[in-house]
Image (cartoon, rainbow, N blue to C red):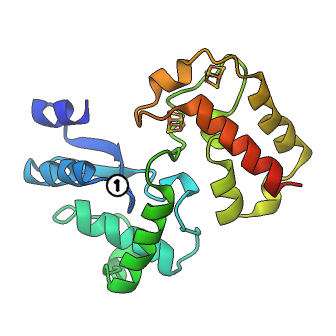
Amino acid sequence: MAREALESGLYDTLQFPFSSLSSAEDLELAREAREKDVGFIAMKALSAGSSRTPLRPSPSSEATRASCRSGASRGRRSSTIPRLEASPPVLDDAMRVLIERDRAELSGSFCRGCGYCLPCPAGIEISMAARMTYLMRRSRFELFVTPEWRAKMELIEKCTGCGGCRKKCPYGLDTPALLKTQLAGYRELAR
Ligand code: SF4
Ligand code: SF4
């Protein structure tokens, strides 16, 4: 759909999930946007919190910024983000190591938190629940061991297996299976 939108010539901008974990195909899309002079807006640039990207500046968040910047937006780049443009990060070997580590860990079946699979008839907050163990390991653990989150995660047991989420996931994830894995990991971590 993104490629179709790009090739239609109808749009000035394209918003697309884009991060340091993006595939070669995604990078190609960003290059095509640049060639066609279509603004490319990186959506979920921090991989919805799954990559090693704390919100404050750090080597890892700089790696994500440098990666997105070098991959997509030369030409029209983020002049509206003065701080980034004042001292733009440059993708270096140390950053590449961090990115490769994230890719090795998250390649394949990782939920980007886009929420396209919602709503779930069982009320499961899929876009959070399907990446819970990553969130717990990479952000503030204590936010997710509350009674509220324990109850929300246990809702996964109510999954009817309707498959609605799997059909809607643009990343081809086996979402019900992923949720079960995440619930097992959550119970282990939250003990
Ligand atoms: S398969 Fe389970 S998680 Fe997915 S939409 Fe159906 S009930 Fe919800
Ligand atoms: S399971 Fe797929 S559609 Fe649902 S939030 Fe995750 S990546 Fe998005």
Q: Is residue 5 above or below residue 89?
A: above
Which quadrant holds the C terminus?
bottom right
Q: Is residue 70 above or below residue 6?
A: below
Expressed as whole percent of the image width and height from the top left, the position of residue 130 reads 62, 41
Q: Residue at x 46, y 30 (%)?
A: 169
Is residue 79 at all visible to an observer of this figure?
Answer: no
Which quadrant holds the N terminus?
top left
Type of amino acid at the residue the image marks with label 1: Ser
- Per the image, the residue denoted by label 1 is 22
Q: Nearer the viewer, residue 150 or 2?
A: 150
Q: Is residue 87 above or below residue 79?
A: below
Q: Secondary structure at mark 1?
A: loop
Total count of labels? 1
Expressed as whole percent of the image width and height from the top left, the position of residue 30 reads 21, 52
Expressed as whole percent of the image width and height from the top left, the position of residue 185 reads 73, 50
Q: Residue at x 49, y 81 (%)?
A: 59
Judge left or right: residue 158 versus residue 39: right
Judge left or right: residue 72 versus residue 36: right
Judge left or right: residue 31 versus residue 137: left
Expressed as whole percent of the image width and height from the top left, the position of residue 26 reads 26, 49
Is residue 67 at all visible to an observer of this figure?
Answer: yes
Q: Residue at x 67, y 42 (%)?
A: 181
Q: Nearer the viewer, residue 98 or 148?
A: 98
